[in-house]
Every structure is written in C-alpha cells, then in structure tokens.
Image (cartoon, helix red, strand yellow):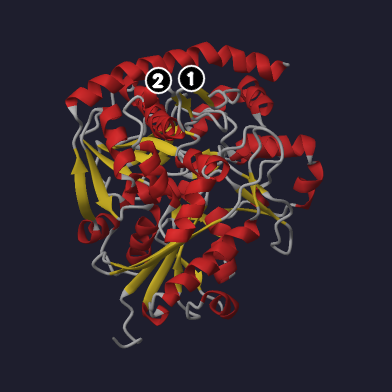
C-alpha cells in the first residue's frame, strides 16, 4: 500500500507500569503493538515516584519494536496519548522537570489530606466532586510546599504524564478537562480550573495549562520528535485523555449502565452514568462522550501485585520463560492452577500501597494469611489472583450502595488476558463478563485520534465501527457460591488486621 495513504491510528498508553503503543486501521483491526515497562521508585514505605525521562524512552523503544514488525509509520493519520492521572510533572521555565513525579499510588500526603478536610473539606467536595485523599494532586503538592518548598519555587509549569510526552512530541503544552479533574483543583460544575483550590497548594494560575477537549488536535510531530520516534514530522497529535477514561471508552462502555472491571496495574470497578453521582468514597469523572460521566471504585494494586510476586518469588518461572521463549505470567498461571479454588486456605490482601476503595486507608499493608507447612508456591500464586478479585468485589460494594445499575460488564486490563484470572474474577463477581478486543486504553486513545482528525464523525461512532468482542465468561454457580463464602472471610481478615496496621504505623 502506498505510504501516501493515511489509514492508521496510533494510541500511546502511559500506564502506571509501562508504555504500550497500539496501531489500528480505520476499521479497528490491530496493525501493530508493543509494550515496554518502566520502573517505579519507592524511596520510603508508602511513597511512589517515577522519572519522566523513562516514559519517553519507553515510548521510543515501543515504537521501534512496532517498526520492526513491519508497520509503515508513513501511514499514520494521527496520534493520541493517554496516561495515568493525578501525576503532576513539575517543570521549570525551560520546561525541564524539577523532580521525579509523585504518582497516584503515593501515600505520603495523609496529614495534608486531613488538613484540607478540616480547612475546607466541604468546599473541595462541592467544587471538585471528590474528597481529599493522597491520590490527588492537590495534597501531593501541598506536601511538597511543606517538605520541599524549593521544588515549587522552581516550578513554572505543571503538566501531567501524557501531556508532558505530548509536549515533547509537539512543543505545545495543554491538557484536557478530564485529566484536569484528577487534580482536585478543577471546578466540575463550571468545567474550568479552580484557582481558589489550586492556591491551597501554592499553585498560581500561570502554572496551569490551557484546557481543551480530548479530541482537540494540539499540534504536529516536530523534526526532533520524528528523529526520536520514527513518526513523520507534521503528523497530527490529538490531545488524548486519562487512561481510565480512554479504556472505559475503548472497551465499549459508551452507554449509561455499562460497567468496567479492570485488571491492570491498579484495579477499578467503573459504572457509566448519564449525570454525575459524587460520593465521598468514590471518584467521579467526565466520560469521553460529552455529557456522560463515570463513577470509579478503585483498588490501588491489582496486576502490579502479580508483577511484584514475579520479581521477588518467581525466579524459576522467569528463567524457564527466557529459556523457552514463553511468557513468565503464563507459567505463573500454570503454577496457580496446581492449587485448587480457595488456594488451600491461603488468603492474599493486595494492600501493597495502602488502599483506596472502599476503605481509603493508607495504613493498610499486603498480607498472606492462612499459611501452613503444607502451603505451596502454587497456593501463594493462586491466592494472589483470588485476593485481587476479592478486592475488586470489595470495590463493587460501593457501587451497590449507590444503587447504580450495571447492565453489562466489560473485563479489561492485562490481567484479563489470563483465562484463569478472568474466570476467577467472573466467579467472585458472580456475573457474566464480556471480553473486548483489544479494548484497552491505547485502543481508546487511537479512536480519539481518529475522531480528532475527522476519520470518525464522533466518539461513539468510532467505538461502534471498531470495537470487537473476543468472548464472554459465564460464572459457575457452584464456584460462585464457594467464593461468596471466601469473600466474607476475606473481609473479616481485613477488619481484624486494619487496627493492627494503624498501631504499626504509630510505632
């Protein structure tokens, strides 16, 4: 096909654990994809930071891998990025980062959250539709204003993960209004920055970027970025949005009542709604489709737990995968299948970075319980998969309390590629789940790119044209009943351990 034909769309997803580049054609068929992990730094317990240069490097490496697959980048019609939200990239006057970025999983700002709640908690909730917790940019920056004031003194511009990368691609610094909602200084009713709330962290209006829609064409690839990435200079770059908004949209959740269960680095249970339903223990965001919203109940750690377990306890599987050119996670699934449902009494609680929904408790810590001399590595591996599923079920309790209808559920994220893990989640939730293909954030970003340059008439039409379904998983009645009992035990263990972790922190 002639390189003059522009029939490919590139979505670049900057998730919490790595960058994934996805290229599709205008019918939604996958033309190429590649993923590269980047590190997260944990300088103190509960802290979580990343180095912005690592994101750009990972993107360039992923794009090089796609070029090696034979994809002609001259065919790319448009690009859009998405990224994990809440993560402020603090830049000096020359647009150079002044420090590593505090990530949304970071828990250091608990004291600042209590201050904010005491000072103006009602004002924050009424304006931003969220409660102050360490996830949000506002308390993170308030912590910096106290403990690293020199950092904010050097800061002249604030961007967010995907916006910083897009700036490096185009030289244009903007963000979209959905991303801005992740700061806790965004006015949800008036769809603009709240300078009053931003001032609580020492942020001035001049630091904040212009707001645009996710589908806005923000610029084109520069000559330098073209040399770095292989993407032709002049290629249109669309704004994009947060990863959760992109993945909900890209998975096909485009009508009120559609729901997402996410098995990625973090885990979510999201429900699409026709109007906002703010709640003190959930998150509320605008949808890519104008006028819609979605409610989020989120766990801090899902597939990242499996990555942690792999890196620390699965040397045998890592070596075997390298030798056989297979995937380590597939071998870990085989290990987990050696253990029966219930993992022979072993439970895992995935609180490796504290927890968000439904507890919002930064003191919680991960644990394996129920261990005996008979416990095997297979039991630990299966307990981890089940524990993350139980945590997602715990998140769903908030959705149930809000009485938000869930008419169909899409299971997404890297963990959904595991047949075993998908079956466990299906049985723990005791509902059928639909598996979109590919239906991830990068796919959603690619659709946003196509909408931005007019390939699709609107965002909903892009999904209806391109999304494919790879299958549906139905719950097993007997296993669902078994897991219902195990879930009650899981919650009792949490209830018993939570005060112990609070005491541990005080000590």
- Residues 425 and 9: in front is 425
N-terminal-most mark, 1 or 2: 2
Q: Is residue 290 visible?
A: no
Q: CA distance from mark 1 to mark 2?
A: 9 Å
In the figure, residue 113 lies in which quadrant? top right
Q: Is residue 419 visible?
A: yes
Tell which tag, 1 or 2, sits nearer the viewer.
Answer: 1
Residue denoted by label 2: 345
Residue denoted by label 1: 372
Tag 2's secondary structure? helix
Q: Is residue 183 left or right of residue 489?
A: right
Spot occupied by residue 6 in the image (x, y as percentages of width and height): 33, 79
Query: Residue placed at 27% from the left, 59% from the top?
Result: 458
Query: Residue placed at 56% from the left, 32% from the top?
Result: 352
- Residues 6 and 36: in front is 36
Cβ atoms under marks 1 and 2 closer than 8 Å: yes
Local crowd size for mark 2, using a 10 Å CA cut-off: few (<14), some (14–19), many (≥20)? some
Above or below — where is 97 with respect to 365? Answer: below
In the figure, residue 22 lies in which quadrant? bottom left
Quadrant including the N terminus: bottom left
Quadrant including the C terminus: top right
Q: Residue furthest front?
A: 374
Above or below — where is 379 with respect to 51? Answer: above
In the figure, residue 354 lies in which quadrant? top right
Tag 1's secondary structure? loop
Spot occupied by residue 346 in the image (x, y as percentages of width and height): 43, 23
Spot occupied by residue 74 in the image (x, y as percentages of width and height): 40, 82
């Amino acid at each position: 096909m002639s390189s003059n034909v522009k029939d490919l769309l590139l979505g670049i997803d900057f998730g919490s654990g790595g960058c994934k580049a996805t290229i599709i054609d205008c019918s939604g068929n996958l033309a190429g994809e590649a993923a590269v992990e980047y590190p997260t730094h944990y300088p103190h317990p509960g802290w979580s930071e990343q180095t912005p240069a690592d994101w750009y490097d990972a993107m360039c490496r992923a794009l090089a891998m796609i070029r090696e697959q034979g994809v002609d980048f001259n065919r790319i019609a448009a690009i859009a990025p998405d990224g994990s939200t809440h993560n402020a990239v603090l830049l000096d006057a020359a647009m150079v980062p002044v420090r590593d970025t505090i990530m949304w999983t970071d828990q250091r700002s608990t004291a600042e959250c209590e201050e904010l709640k005491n000072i103006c908690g009602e004002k924050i909730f009424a304006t931003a539709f969220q409660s102050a917790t360490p996830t949000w940019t506002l308390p993170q920056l308030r912590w910096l204003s106290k403990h690293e004031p020199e950092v904010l003194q050097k800061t002249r511009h604030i961007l967010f993960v995907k916006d910083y990368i897009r700036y490096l691609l185009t030289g244009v610094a903007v963000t979209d209004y959905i991303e801005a909602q992740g700061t806790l200084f965004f006015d949800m009713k008036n769809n603009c920055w709240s300078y009053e709330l931003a001032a609580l962290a020492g942020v001035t209006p001049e630091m904040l970027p212009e707001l645009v829609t996710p589908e806005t064409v923000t610029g084109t690839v520069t000559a330098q970025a073209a040399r770095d990435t292989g993407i032709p200079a002049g290629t249109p770059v669309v704004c994009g949005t947060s990863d959760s908004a992109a993945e909900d949209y890209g998975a096909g959740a485009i009508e009120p009542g559609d729901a997402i269960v996410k098995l990625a680095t973090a885990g979510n249970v999201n429900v699409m709604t026709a109007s906002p339903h703010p709640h003190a223990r959930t998150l509320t965001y605008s949808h890519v489709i104008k006028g819609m919203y979605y409610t989020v109940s989120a766990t801090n750690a899902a597939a990242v737990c499996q990555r942690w377990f792999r890196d620390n306890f699965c040397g045998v599987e890592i070596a075997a995968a390298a030798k056989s050119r297979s995937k380590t996670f597939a071998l870990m699934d085989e290990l987990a299948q050696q253990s029966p449902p219930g993992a022979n009494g072993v439970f895992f609680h995935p609180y490796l970075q504290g927890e968000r929904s439904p507890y919002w408790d930064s003191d919680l810590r991960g644990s394996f319980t129920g261990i005996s001399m008979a416990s095997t590595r297979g039991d630990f591996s299966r307990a981890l998969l089940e524990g993350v599923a139980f945590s997602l079920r715990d998140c769903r309790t908030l959705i149930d309390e809000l009485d938000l209808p869930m008419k169909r559920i899409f299971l997404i994220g890297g963990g959904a590629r595991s047949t075993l893990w998908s079956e466990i989640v299906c049985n723990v939730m005791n509902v059928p789940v639909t598996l979109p293909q590919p239906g991830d954030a990068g796919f959603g970003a690619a659709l946003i790119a196509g909408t931005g340059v007019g390939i699709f008439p609107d965002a909903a039409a892009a999904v209806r044209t391109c999304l494919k379904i790879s299958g549906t998983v139905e719950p097993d009645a007997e296993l669902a009943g078994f897991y219902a009992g195990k879930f009650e035990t899981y919650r009792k263990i949490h209830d018993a351990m939570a005060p112990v972790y609070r005491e541990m922190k005080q000590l």
